[in-house]
Amino acid sequence: MSTALNHPFFLAEGKRYFTFPLYMKAKFGGRYQKVSVDAGFSCPNRDGTKSTDGCTFCSNDAFNPSYCSPEKPLLQQIDEGIRFHRLRYRRAGKYLAYFQPFSNTNADVSTLRKLYFEALSHPDVHGLVIGTRPDCIDDEKLELLAEIAEQYLLFLEFGIESCHDKTLLRVNRQHSVADAEDAVRKAASRGIHTGAHFILGLPGETEEDMLSYSAFINNLPLNTVKFHQLQLFKETMMAAEYAKNPASFHLFSLEEYTNLIISVLELLRSDLPIERLAGEVPPRFLDVPPWGNLRNDQILQYIERKMEELDTWQGKML
Ligand code: SF4
């Protein structure tokens, strides 16, 4: 998909950035709804492979829908997830099984094969979304994913979180920026659709540090990208750190975050689809509730309105 520099096609579609729905329509013919499944994986940063503490911000409960529990068989979780989504989004007809909580490549290849194909055996599931860590993938696992990608839609998502080693160290990620770059390049070189997730506002990062995410991302063969503002979840190590020393954190107001994410977008290549610009989790999970009770679509509208006012767009400053 080519876009002319400084006049990207999404402006003609009335958008200020390359939205994920625009991308899905252009590349895959329309909308697919993700249905989360919990296959009972752990994570190398929790099971002792790397550490037992986990990342300091980690709270997988906050992202796990109620229908999703490893005690239930995968196909039952998918059935319940589809029922849940059909009630809310009547237009949804095509589904992707989203292996979401923890690290969903954290098992041997034969176990992964069994679980992935079990999900794909559901008649309404057209493909998979697999979330994992950059250090939890190897050649054998990538071969399996490439094999699946030849027959089904397959989206691999890496949590990279920051492009600065000092930050990854501080939040106990237990992998490096170089690990992340390596994993993305290896996946992309096999033709696997590869996405990445970043958090803006991690402790110790300056505005300049955060603006440099764009150049880092521009240099990677990524197909999509997701951004979240830092949120503090109850009972996490980071919440305890915040309680002891709140001055070492800067939690953005909506206006501050809007200005920052717009600056990040202005420096981002305009052919990169943006799957998420901000995060929204139920306030009951949050230690420090931000921004009132704004829903994700309201946050997006706020950011888009500000981009209109400023007459700016993704890639404008490149
Ligand atoms: S890698 Fe993911 S699942 Fe594992 S501790 Fe970190 S945030 Fe949690």
Image (spheres, rainbow, N blue to C red):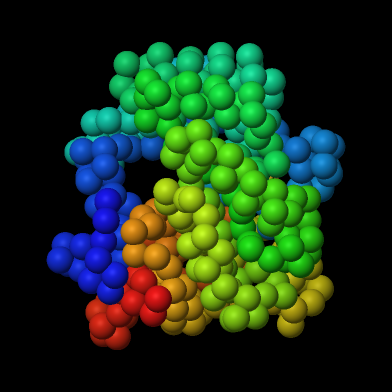
Decide which of 313, 295 is in the foreground and name it. Answer: 313
Q: Residue at x 22, y 45 (%)?
A: 25
In the image, residue 34 lies at what x, y percent?
Answer: 38, 37
Callout count? 0
Decide which of 196, 62 is in the foreground and name it. Answer: 196
Position above or below: 137 against 311? above
* Residue 215 left/right relative to 107: left
* Residue 292 left/right relative to 92: right
Task: Please indicate, yes or no, whether residue 72 appears anywhere in the rendered image.
Answer: no
Q: Residue at x 22, y 40 (%)?
A: 30
Query: Dividing the picture into quarters, in which one does residue 79 lie?
Result: top left
Q: Residue at x 33, y 38 (%)?
A: 33
Q: Quadrant of the C terminus?
A: bottom left
Decide which of 13, 71 is in the foreground and name it. Answer: 13
Decide which of 216, 36 is in the foreground and name it. Answer: 216
In the image, residue 134 lies at what x, y percent?
Answer: 65, 44
Task: Please indicate, yes or no, whether residue 148 appears anywhere in the rendered image.
Answer: yes
Q: Residue at x 56, y 17 (%)?
A: 113
In the image, residue 183 lies at what x, y percent?
Answer: 62, 43
Position above or below: 95 against 243? above
* Residue 63 left/right relative to 134: left
Query: Dividing the picture into quarters, in which one does residue 56 lie?
Result: bottom right
In the image, residue 22 lies at what x, y percent?
Answer: 25, 52
Residue lying farthest left? 12
Position above or below: 197 against 96? below
